[in-house]
Image (cartoon, rainbow, N blue to C red):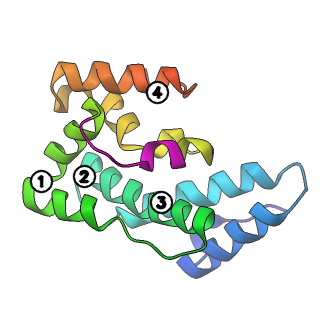
Amino acid sequence: MLIDLTKLTDAQLETLMNNARASTKPEAPALYRAAAVELFRRRGSDYTDPVIAGCWGAIALLDRCRYEKTGKHLKSTYSVRSMIRNGEIAFMTDCARGKTQGTGFVLLVEAGLGTCTVEYIVAANPDRFPEDAVLSARARLAEHGVALPE
């Protein structure tokens, strides 16, 4: 049975992710990732710039992964404050350069969502970021076994 994830509400997507996480069926991890990517896409849908949309989607997905790991609804308030204060591009550049103290990258990679990280967005859009940030992001992705964008 195929599920059209685009027709589910956010709450239904989160329930689907919970059920997939608890399931032992072989297709459960793929379903979890597909639902997470749909959630990632939706959380950034208020923005017309796909890079900015991806940044906000990554933060929303990070909050979800942090909840799954800790059982607590902890928000990425430091990241959001930084994005509001300095702008999304500056925030993403700092993340890619490794200047942040956060654990978001590792949480998303551990959940199998390396393509939904800020570093992946930076690596996939080299024309929007400084060269050193792109190189650093690509190195970090490769180091953690995430397939690099072309």
In the image, taking residue 18 as reference, residue 24 lies left or right, namely: right
Q: Secondary structure at mark 4?
A: helix
Pointer 3: residues within 10 angstroms few (<14), some, or many (20+)? many
Residue 88, percent across and down?
18, 51
- Could you tell me which residue is drawn at 27 percent across and 46 percent down? 51
The amino acid type of the residue labelled 1 equals: Gly
Lower sequence index among marks 1 and 4: 1
Lower sequence index among marks 1 and 3: 3
- Identify the residue under disc 4: 141
Pointer 1: residues within 10 angstroms few (<14), some, or many (20+)? few
- Rounded to the nearest angstrom, the CA distance separating label 1 from label 3 is 19 Å
- Give residue 52's mark: 2
Q: Secondary structure at mark 1?
A: loop
In the image, taking residue 30 as reference, residue 56 lies left or right, namely: left
Pointer 2: residues within 10 angstroms few (<14), some, or many (20+)? many
Residue 11's image quarter?
Answer: bottom right
The amino acid type of the residue labelled 3 equals: Leu
Q: Is residue 104 magenta?
A: yes
- Could you tell me which residue is drawn at 40 percent across and 35 percent down? 120
- Identify the residue under disc 1: 87
Residue 124, percent across and down?
35, 30
- Rounded to the nearest angstrom, the CA distance separating label 4 from label 3 is 18 Å
In the image, taking residue 82 as reference, residue 86 lies left or right, namely: left
Q: Which residues make up the magenta segment?
A: 99-107
- Identify the residue under disc 3: 61
Residue 81's image quarter?
Answer: bottom left
- Residue in front for this viewpoint, 135 or 44: 135
